[in-house]
């Protein structure tokens, strides 16, 4: 009961920051949706890729779909259960990354590689699943963000391994170009540091 009481106190103490971060998340989801609609309607080009040209196409859609869903779930559930005072930062960092990715996808007019494996996503997420939203790889980026957020925790190793595994999965499924995967690590690191500076400022002024 003592830990539950402390958990409730942390939620209440950070309620305003959590609320703001949730609004930030909603905005990022809306932007991501319209960016996805735009790149799906906008015709792009299929580009050659040195790595894809030399690896086979493998059916790894179970890991592609459910592995990614697990990563997203853990990014939010871990701080919600164990580090409530960091929850608003995690939500904010995730939202910022999604916003940045939305902008990048709109300015990168590439079509899915011609050798890409077709897959069916569950109906729950089918409305936010798009084609041609390639640069940069969200699977790789979100998992790597989890590592940056929790790199001092044991779960950080899970996210690091997940970023590598999901990066390999999207390449072998040919649903991303190699540059989408490789750039995800660098862009996510930059997004994380921007968010870190921004949310530290918010915390300073909210005291």
Image (cartoon, helix red, strand yellow):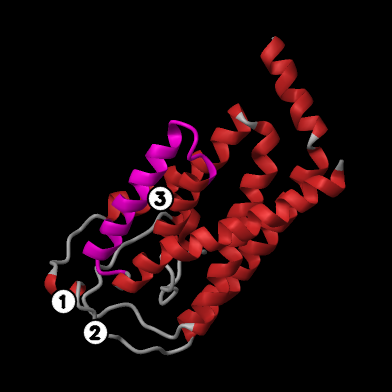
Which SS does the magenta portion mostly show?
helix
Name the residue beneath numbered marker 1. Answer: 53
Residue 170 at what x, y percent from top left?
30, 62
Find out whether the residues at labels 1 and 2 contact each other: C-beta distance under 8 Å: yes
Q: Is residue 4 above or below residue 68?
A: above
Label 3 and label 1: CA atoms lie apart by: 25 Å
The mark nearer the N terminus, 1 or 2, is: 2
Kind of element beneath mark 3: helix
Q: Does the magenta stretch include residue 147?
A: no
Mark sitting on residue 77? none
Across and down, in percent, residue 20 comes to 78, 51
Residue hosting label 2? 48
Residue 68 disc label: 3
Residue 60 lies left or right of residue 99; in this view the side is left
Quadrant where the N terminus sits is top right
Query: From which residue to which does the magenta span run?
Result: 149-175
């Amino acid at each position: 009961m003592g830990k539950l009481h402390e958990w409730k106190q942390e939620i209440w103490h950070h309620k305003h920051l959590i609320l703001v971060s949730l609004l930030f998340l909603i905005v990022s989801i809306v932007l991501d949706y319209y960016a996805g609609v735009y790149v799906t309607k906008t015709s792009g080009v299929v580009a050659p890729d040195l790595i894809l040209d030399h690896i086979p196409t493998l059916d790894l859609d179970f890991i592609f779909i459910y592995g990614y869903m697990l990563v997203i779930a853990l990014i939010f559930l871990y701080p919600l259960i164990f580090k409530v005072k960091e929850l608003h930062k995690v939500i904010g960092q995730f939202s910022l990354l999604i916003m940045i990715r939305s902008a990048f996808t709109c300015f990168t007019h590439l079509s899915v590689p011609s050798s890409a494996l077709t897959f069916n996503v569950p109906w729950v997420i089918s409305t936010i699943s798009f084609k041609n939203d390639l640069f940069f790889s969200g699977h790789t980026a979100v998992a790597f963000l989890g590592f940056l957020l929790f790199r001092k925790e044991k779960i950080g190793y899970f996210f690091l391994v997940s970023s590598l595994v999901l990066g390999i999965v999207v390449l072998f499924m040919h649903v991303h170009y190699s540059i989408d995967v490789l750039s995800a690590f660098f862009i996510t690191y930059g997004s994380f540091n921007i968010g870190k500076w921004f949310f530290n400022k918010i915390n300073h002024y909210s005291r």
